[in-house]
Amino acid sequence: MVAHDDYEVVCAWDPDPEACARVKEAHPTVQIAASAEEVIEDGNTNAIYIASPPTTHTPYARAVAEAGKCIFCEKPLGIDIAESEALARFVEDCGVPNAINFNHSNARSSTHLENELASGAAGEVTGVDIFIHLTEWPREFQSHATWLAGRKQGGFTREMISHWVYLTRRLLGDGKVLSRNATFPDASDKAETRLVAELEFGGVPTIINAACGGAGPVGTQYTLWAGRKSFMLHSGGRISVTEGVDWKPISANGDEDSEDDISRNISAVAKAFRGEPAKIATIADGLAVQKIVEALIAN
């Protein structure tokens, strides 16, 4: 956001003093506040980015809504359905612009796929397969966020699969869980190590097969099968297409602009916060995804 023309980052806070020090060193103009509340109440802020563990999202988002400021919240929206439902109603009543940070809100690959379906070029969708393999969880770059490893707030279903649930619901319609089998370590508070599930989005069968552990490539393959063209989205935003023979990599709107997917997403959020038309995921979308995700890993 510091490098983005639509944003001016004026202040920030984190409970870890070392994290605050790193931000101050990298971005000397950003003021380090004494608390989250100070960031929210600062007269120079009109939008607040909430990037904290899920159980803190509701109190922070409520405070931002009460202050009449825009909410940009990390996913998952929360882990308690009733709490998140109440939050969604409260934010709607306050009438503040809001967004959830799902990767596929405005990514090139998912936008290309959405356009292919809308135009009819892909044909009738017959199924979706979501395959994820990890050698460890959390991944090395996330290991400092220790809550990600726990069953209470973390796990790859909430952190990773939620992005693909959002995309599938956006492309095909509301979803429901038909069957699921989540594997957890015995006698442990650790997050799931495997998930196999059957869902349905807009009547389209959807299979999830996700696992952590074992040697092999790390990544995601999201395959949407359709009558004329089928598509595979890969980790890192790559996309391939087949019309019945081999998979061929394609460029998804690569010549339209030079922004990467992160910039595209926060550009759309800025437009929405200014009241301009934009395609973003909202707290209402986050709640719908949360309901499916929590059903997948329920005890």
Image (tube, grey):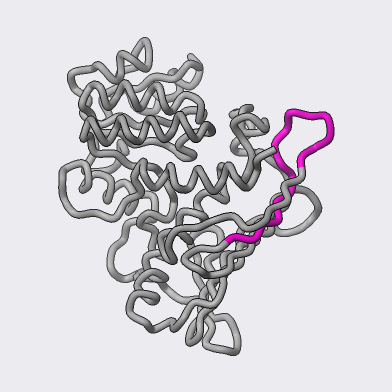
Q: Judge by depth and name the residue closer to the eye, 38 or 282.
A: 282
| x and y percentages locating residue 66 in the rendered image | 25, 22
The residue that appears at 46% across and 54% down in the rendered structure is 166
Asked whether 197 falls inside the magenta stretch, the response is: yes
The residue that appears at 63% across and 29% down in the rendered structure is 152
Name the side, left or right, on which 267 lies relative to 276.
right
Residue 102 seen by the camera: yes
The furthest residue to the right:
186
Examine the rendered structure and indicate whether residue 68 appears above or below residue 177: above
Magenta span dominant secondary structure: loop
The furthest residue to the left:
275
* Image quarter in which the N terminus is found: top left
| x and y percentages locating residue 32 in the rendered image | 35, 16
Residue interval drawn in magenta: 184-199
Q: How many marks?
A: 0
Examine the rendered structure and indicate whether residue 28 appears above or below residue 3: above
Picture quadrant where residue 179 is located:
bottom right
Asked whether 70 falls inside the magenta stretch, the response is: no
Name the side, left or right, on which 195 lies relative to 227.
right
* Image quarter in which the C terminus is found: top right
Q: Judge by depth and name the residue closer to the eye, 103 or 185.
A: 185
Picture quadrant where residue 145 is located:
top right
| x and y percentages locating residue 67 in the rendered image | 23, 21
| x and y percentages locating residue 202 in the rendered image | 47, 66
The residue that appears at 56% across and 73% down in the rendered structure is 127
Residue 135 seen by the camera: no
The furthest residue to the top:
34
